[in-house]
Image (cartoon, rainbow, N blue to C red):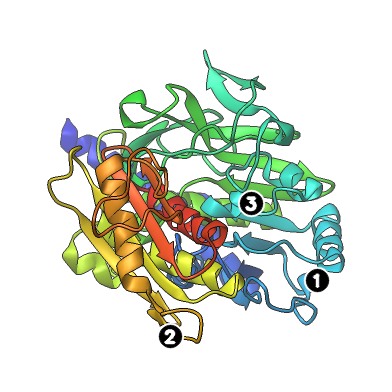
């Protein structure tokens, strides 16, 4: 019986009219503009994920992909004017600085007039104050979004529901494989796919907020309270309209491991075609995951050179420390101060051992002057971290007299993470500036610890 079933299903694939897609690819390739340039500071490796997204679209043999990389934060945007009219769909792998008004207007007109848009993962964090963009994406997270951005959207008892209680927008637990459930299985993007499939290791976005207008949630994933989740069925795939434009929004795709999921690839390729043309001509790939098993493409996963160390699991201090120090360096440079940044992580209280990393921004000491004896900034930064490890409070808290070897100065921040304490300290500027720099380091550590 089983052999007969297999033979039958092969026959269905072989005789499927979807062969038409190959012919379509030859005759008219869909021009795609992929925009990147930044993604939540150092937290996403956008240079690499852009290469992966481009390769996946090209593999579909339906698209011609052009990449436009925006200027970085603080740089001049006046010469960044991609000609949207040359493309049928824009893929956003971008969470960076707000765009100038003329660029926003051109983008709005492109979508309004029937251009397609694909929003991938952290791109829905971008542009918290741009009303039209938030209408296009439907929901988004972080970047200071609160209830003023709109309610939280989720599925309850099989239908879309919302909750406008006050609070911040955006959260996720540790990166794990999770089950995605189709809610509109007849939509062209999902038609023929399993009703539920395991998505490879990824962040499961939850508590996203937004206007949710003209939005159809195609698929959801249950956010597990055991993994810092909401216990709600959170939107995973959405389609929206804005004027004549079609939008496909996938919240999946944190890193290469997530992007290598055969389920991500198929829904991304199909969603991009749908946003561009309103139809899907691609057949369901044979490696599409099932409800019980993840399925990922090793050739894609290997595009991340860390693949040889194993598929990415929960972030470690080691994996976030450099990004945290980089964020502190950036902030210090913005504030025009030099000095020493330290980040540290430990699990027990009292402290038994910790992991730490240090970076020098400009200079590790202040030289002696007529009136000042000079300062060992390295010693001060570690002294702040040491004080925090002892008191579990921000440095300079004055909960007790300073001990020998400490300075009792402000400029270090400590917070409780999921399983331990996160510490960041800076020495080099005024206390307020050192605190600001430290907060940026903590913010990066908090994304995973
Ligand atoms: Zn992410």
Write the residue at 85% across / 65% down: 106
Sequence-first tag of 2 and 1 = 1
Q: CA distance from mark 2 to mark 1?
A: 57 Å
Q: Secondary structure at mark 1?
A: helix
Q: Are marks 3 and 2 in contact (CB under 8 Å)?
A: no
Sequence-first tag of 3 and 2 = 3
Q: Residues within 10 Å of mark 2 (few under 14, many from 20)?
A: few
Q: CA distance from mark 3 to mark 2?
A: 62 Å
Residue carrying label 1: 85
- Mark 1 CB lies closer than 8 A to ligand 1: no
Residue 425, given in percent of the width and then of the height, sits at 39, 59
Residue carrying label 3: 274
Residue 142 has which mark? none
**Observer-nearest residue: 264 or 101?**
101
Residue carrying label 2: 367
Can residue 298 be seen here? The reply is no
Q: Name the front one of labels 3 and 2.
A: 2
Residue 416, given in percent of the width and then of the height, sits at 35, 38
Q: Residues within 10 Å of mark 3 (few under 14, many from 20)?
A: many
Q: Name the front one of labels 2 and 1.
A: 2
Q: Name the front one of labels 3 and 1.
A: 1
In the orientation shown, which residue stands out farthest toward the top?
157
Give the image quarter of residue 174: top left
Sequence-first tag of 3 and 1 = 1
145 in relation to 270, above or below: above
Can residue 243 be seen here? The reply is yes
Left-right relation of 365 to 297: right
């Amino acid at each position: 019986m089983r052999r007969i079933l297999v033979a039958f299903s092969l026959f269905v694939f072989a005789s499927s009219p979807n062969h038409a897609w190959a012919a379509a690819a030859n005759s008219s390739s869909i021009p795609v503009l992929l925009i990147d340039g930044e993604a939540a500071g150092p937290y996403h490796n956008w240079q690499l994920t852009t290469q992966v997204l481009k390769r996946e679209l090209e593999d579909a043999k339906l698209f011609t992909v052009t990449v436009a990389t925006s200027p970085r934060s603080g740089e001049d945007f006046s010469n960044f004017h991609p000609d949207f009219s040359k493309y049928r769909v824009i893929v956003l792998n971008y969470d960076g600085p707000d765009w100038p008004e003329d660029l926003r207007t051109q983008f709005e007109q492109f979508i309004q007039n029937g251009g397609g848009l694909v929003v991938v993962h952290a791109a829905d964090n971008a542009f918290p104050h741009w009303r039209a963009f938030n209408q296009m994406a439907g929901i988004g997270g972080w970047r200071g979004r609160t209830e003023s951005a709109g309610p939280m959207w989720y599925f309850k008892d099989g239908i879309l529901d919302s909750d406008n209680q006050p609070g911040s927008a955006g959260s996720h637990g540790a990166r794990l494989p999770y089950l995605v459930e189709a809610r509109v299985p007849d939509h062209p993007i999902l038609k023929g796919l399993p009703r539920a499939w395991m998505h490879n290791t990824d962040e499961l976005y939850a508590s996203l907020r937004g206007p949710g207008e003209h939005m159809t949630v195609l698929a959801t994933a249950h956010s597990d309270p055991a993994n810092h989740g909401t216990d709600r069925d959170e939107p995973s795939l959405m389609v929206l309209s804005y004027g004549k434009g079609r939008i496909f929004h996938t919240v999946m795709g944190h890193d290469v491991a997530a992007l290598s999921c055969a389920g991500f690839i198929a829904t991304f390729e199909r969603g991009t075609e749908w946003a561009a043309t309103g139809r899907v001509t691609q057949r369901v790939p044979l490696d599409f995951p099932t409800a019980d098993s993840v399925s990922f493409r090793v050739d894609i996963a290997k595009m991340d050179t860390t693949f040889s160390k194993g598929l990415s699991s929960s972030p470690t201090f080691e994996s976030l420390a450099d990004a945290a120090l980089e964020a502190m360096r950036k902030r210090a440079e913005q504030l025009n101060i030099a000095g020493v940044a330290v980040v540290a992580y430990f699990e027990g209280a009292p402290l038994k051992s910790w992991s730490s990393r240090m970076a020098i921004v400009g200079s590790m000491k202040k030289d002696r002057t007529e009136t000042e004896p000079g300062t060992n900034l390295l010693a001060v930064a570690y002294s702040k971290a040491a004080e925090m490890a002892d008191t579990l409070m921000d440095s300079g808290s004055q909960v007790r007299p300073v001990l020998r070897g400490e300075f009792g100065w402000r400029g270090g921040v400590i917070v409780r993470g999921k399983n331990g304490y996160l510490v960041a300290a800076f020495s080099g500027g005024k206390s307020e500036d050192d605190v600001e720099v430290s907060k940026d380091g903590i913010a990066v550590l908090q994304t995973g610890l």
